[in-house]
Image (cartoon, rainbow, N blue to C red):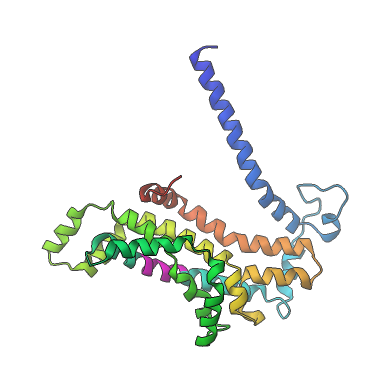
Amino acid sequence: MGGRPRRAMRRLLLYAAMVAAAAFFVAPVFWMVSISLQPENEVFSKAPHWLPREPTLRNYRDLFARAEEAPVARWFANSVIVAGGGTLTYLLIASMAAYAFSRLRFPGREPLFVLVLATLIIPGQVTIIPVFLVLQRLGWFNTYLALIVPGLSGAFGVFLLRQFFLTIPRDLEEAAMLDGCGPAGIYARIILPLAKPALATLAIFSFLGGWNDFLLPLIATNEVEMRTLPVGLTLFLGRYDMQYGMVMAVATVASLPVVLIFLAFQRHIVRGVVLSGIKG
């Protein structure tokens, strides 16, 4: 076999492997949506099938019809507020810290940055009891502050943005200083506009973390109306004796915002990961 046919065969095998890997990851999502569109008697049929024989939206209608027992719409709104508000606040805090560590000179900058990075190796479960005690002392139970503020201390965003800020030429900063622009102006008018890919990447990671967080909303709230979707889903499981069609409908509704945001910003995510030097 010559060189060209061999390369064509390798490319064909590579594409086949990629299609198989994509099918492996997409299959659970497709199965979830399919179950959510099937009536209950079809879900428990002896021969499972991928496509619903009698597709119905009854599971979605019943989902929002039991608002008094399971306020799914309120849980959805809580998740949007917690994930969205936490993401915007975290971007502001992390970008300001990253700018200080990458551009400003002050005593102890490098040891302090190493100390910040060291917090990455501490699992979140280790700090959950201190966080619980602090929230109890502040009286923040069943408030959005309890669901947002503890998540603003992550060091990953500081590291990612600092790596990106270091790639921005200092000539731009020096030219702005000659024009009379101070550090705050350079941060707001030069650094942040040039860092849109890294900010989009961090926004996705932060939103996913806030949207999927389970442990903090579980310990920081005890009222049903203040639950988020991941915690509300578990309450749903026991309350309705595992109605799989309805549970899959909840999971589908919970997945939609994440999928839409990823599709909208995927180009910025890939560019931000590459330019930040965190690929692999």
The verdict on residue 255 being magenta is no
- Say whether residue 147 is left or right of residue 53: left
Residue at the far right: name it: 46
Q: Residue 256 or 174: which is nearer the viewer?
A: 174
The residue under the point 29% across, 61% down is: 110
Look at the picture and state if 35 lies above or below 250.
above
Which residue range is magenta in the image? 87-94
Q: Which residue is at the front of the view, 9 or 238?
A: 238
Residue 98 shows in this picture? no
In percent of width and height, residue 150 lies at: 49, 74
Q: What predominant SS class does the magenta segment belong to?
A: helix
- On screen, residue 269 above or below 156: above
Res. 133 in view: yes
Q: Is residue 2 left or right of residue 50?
A: left
Horizontally, residue 250 falls left or right of residue 257, namely right
Residue displayed at 42% across by 61% down: 118
| Quadrant of image for the N terminus | top right
Q: Nearer the viewer, residue 247 or 107?
A: 107
**Residue 147, position as x, y percentages in the image:** 53, 75
Q: How many marks?
A: 0
Q: Residue furthest left?
A: 178
Identify which residue is drawn at 52% across, 79% down: 146
Q: Is residue 88 magenta?
A: yes
Residue 62 pos. (x, y %): 75, 70
| Image coordinates for residue 35, horizontal then vertical, percent | 75, 55
Residue appearing at x 81%, y 54% in the figure: 54
